């Protein structure tokens, strides 16, 4: 069993200081660097393996790699950030928000772990450096670096399968998918978005007569409008019976394009969307959309991070959270 003395020797602090910190002495006054160094050594030596879970709440970072413009374009990430911060606050933990990984690397000694939102333009070498300094990390909503960090994501592949089964069960035979591009990881080719990949596979499996894909650009209202216009240009007045759209933000733009062209949803075509953002209920028509429970995702992400901090030698964990369809007026049963 690891002792207080061993931790004191390895960390360079007195046994008294180590003991008071690990026993959560509220009267102890030490710097954040001292606190995290002691806790890091305790975790590395396996201090908690034969004891109760640590009573000392770790200090963590939130690496939120979305700028203000991106948040305006896709409200999903703004609400995800709020859900994460609320979950951290409710857990009584301290958190500092960063936008750039390099900034977190410079201050890594102040933290025991981090949560990360945003997977586009991930520089592999930068995150390898971060992993060396701060190995306990959880990507939230994405999983770009599974060999380095844990992750929690909505189960989008299952979401797409369920949506296509909804279309099939309702008798739809001609459908289409509207989505955006996947993440850029270092210098690798840009990845295909997982929703598009699942659409192609499941549509073929369910043997739809038509299953076209319109997928490019960002997950923004403007891009949704442009993709909606592209669909109208291709099909004219022979639109598919239904569209699966990868996000509510894209759906808003598609609805704008359809409205300008005189296409009435769900009379002329149906829409099923993904996210169940606040706006989904108030557009015309209200969107049938899959709800992603950000509170559950946030709680799971924080629990996985705490476990990674307390058990640094364990394998990486990658969790999926199922979604549920909120049926509204944009989808018509035949």
Image: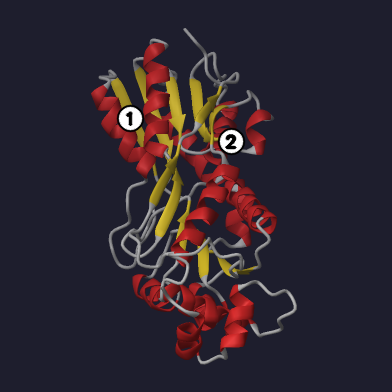
In this view of the protein, can residue 57 be seen by the observer?
yes
| Viewer-side residue, 108 vs 10 | 10
Picture coordinates of residue 196, whole percent (x, y): 35, 39
Q: Secondary structure at mark 1?
A: strand
In this view of the protein, can residue 235 be seen by the observer?
no
Q: Is residue 9 above or below residue 311?
A: below
Q: Which mark is residue 288?
A: none
Q: How is the image coloured?
A: secondary structure
Picture coordinates of residue 95, whole percent (x, y): 64, 67
Point 62% across, 72% down: residue: 23
Point 39% across, 62% down: residue: 149
Point 52% across, 13% down: residue: 332
| Viewer-side residue, 227 vs 278 | 278
Residue position for label 1 = 212
Direction top: furthest residue:
334
| Viewer-side residue, 47 vs 308 | 47
Side (left or right) of 38 relative to 121: right
Q: CA distance from mark 2 to mark 1?
A: 20 Å
Picture coordinates of residue 224, whole percent (x, y): 51, 40
Residue position for label 2 = 252
């Amino acid at each position: 069993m690891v002792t207080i003395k061993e931790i004191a020797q390895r960390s360079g602090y007195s046994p008294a200081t180590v003991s008071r910190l690990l026993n959560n002495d509220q009267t102890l006054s030490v710097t954040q660097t001292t606190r995290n160094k002691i806790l890091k050594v305790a975790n590395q030596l396996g201090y908690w393996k034969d004891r109760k879970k640590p009573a000392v709440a770790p200090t963590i970072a939130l690496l939120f790699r979305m700028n203000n413009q991106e948040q305006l374009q896709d409200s999903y990430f703004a609400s995800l950030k709020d859900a994460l911060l609320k979950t951290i606050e409710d857990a009584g933990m301290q958190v500092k928000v960063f936008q750039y990984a390099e900034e977190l690397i410079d201050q890594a000694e102040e933290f025991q772990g981090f949560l990360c939102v945003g997977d586009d333009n991930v520089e592999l070498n930068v995150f390898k450096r971060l992993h060396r300094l701060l190995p306990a990390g959880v990507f939230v909503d994405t999983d770009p670096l599974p060999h380095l960090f844990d992750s929690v994501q909505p189960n989008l592949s299952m979401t797409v399968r369920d949506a296509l089964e909804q279309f099939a069960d309702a008798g739809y035979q001609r459908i289409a998918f509207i989505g955006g591009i996947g993440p850029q990881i270092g210098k690798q080719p840009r990845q295909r978005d997982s929703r598009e990949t699942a659409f192609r596979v499941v549509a073929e499996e369910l043997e739809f007569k038509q299953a076209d894909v319109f997928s490019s650009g960002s997950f923004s209202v403007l891009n949704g409008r442009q993709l909606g216009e592209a669909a109208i240009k291709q099909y004219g007045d022979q639109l598919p019976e239904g569209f699966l759209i990868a996000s509510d933000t894209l759906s808003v733009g598609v609805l704008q394009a359809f409205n300008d062209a005189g296409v009435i949803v769900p009379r002329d075509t149906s829409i099923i969307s993904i996210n169940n953002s606040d706006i989904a209920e108030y557009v015309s028509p209200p969107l049938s959309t899959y709800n992603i429970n950000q509170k559950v995702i946030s709680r799971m992400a924080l629990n996985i991070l705490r476990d990674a901090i307390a058990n640094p030698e364990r394998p990486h964990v990658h969790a999926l959270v199922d979604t549920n369809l909120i049926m509204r007026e944009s989808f018509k049963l035949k």
